[in-house]
Image: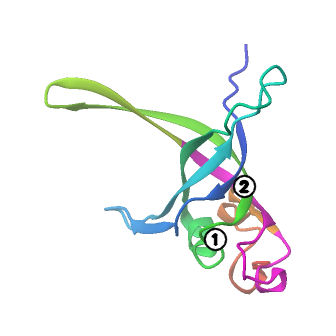
Amino acid sequence: MANFNRTQFVGRLTAEPVPCVTKNGYHVLAFTLAVDNPISKKNKKAPKTAEFIPHEIYGKLADAMEKHLHKGMLVLTEGSLHISPYTKDGVSHKSLKIVARWIGFLAWPKGQKEEEVPDCVASFEDVESGEVEGDDLPF
């Protein structure tokens, strides 16, 4: 049986993305998406709720997206679920995050014009494989 670990989310960035660099010099961009939960057909008067889903992107895609992702943007992400176990105060925990490999821009924050954000998407595979680099980046 083939392994399949793929996620897709549509949501808004809850804050400005946080860039960092790993010990090995690898670039990471972390952000959280607020993803609306569907409203039940049976209970249409129920209050809207959302899930807050942590995301990370890596490498050249992280560098490129750092310039264009901003609080309030509506984006589509595709990636995979990563679970990291850790121990704190002798208690075992798990940390969940999405490693995004593709990001599409869907809408912009209030006050930001659409033409200020590139009309494109980029994939982790394209950037990391060298198919898109330097001046060839569409953003």
Foreground pick, 82 / 12? 12
Foreground pick, 37 / 68? 37
- Dot 1 falls on a residue whose secondary structure is loop
Residue at 70% over, 72% down = 109
Magenta residues span: 98-120
Q: Position of residue 7 (x, y in %)?
A: 69, 37
Q: Position of residue 137 (x, y in %)?
A: 75, 78
Foreground pick, 40 / 95? 40
Foreground pick, 12 / 28? 12
Q: Quadrant of the C terminus?
A: bottom right
- Mark linked to residue 107: none
Q: Quadrant of the N terminus?
A: top right
Residue at 75% over, 71% down = 108
- Cα–Cα span, label 1 and label 2: 13 Å
Q: Position of residue 50 (x, y in %)?
A: 62, 41
Q: Is residue 86 left or right of residue 81?
A: left
Q: Amino acid at mark 2?
A: Trp
Residue at 71% over, 44% down = 9
Q: Is residue 107 magenta?
A: yes
* Location of residue 49 by image quarter: top right
When the figure is inspected, residue 74 is found, relative to residue 90, above or below; the finding is below
When the figure is inspected, residue 59 is found, relative to residue 50, above or below; the finding is below
* Location of residue 19 by image quarter: bottom left
Tag nearer the camera, 1 or 2: 1
Which residue is the site of mark 2?
102
Label 2: how many Cα within 10 Å (few below 14, some 14–19, many 20+): some
Which residue is the site of mark 1?
69
Upstream in the sequence, badge 1 or badge 2? 1
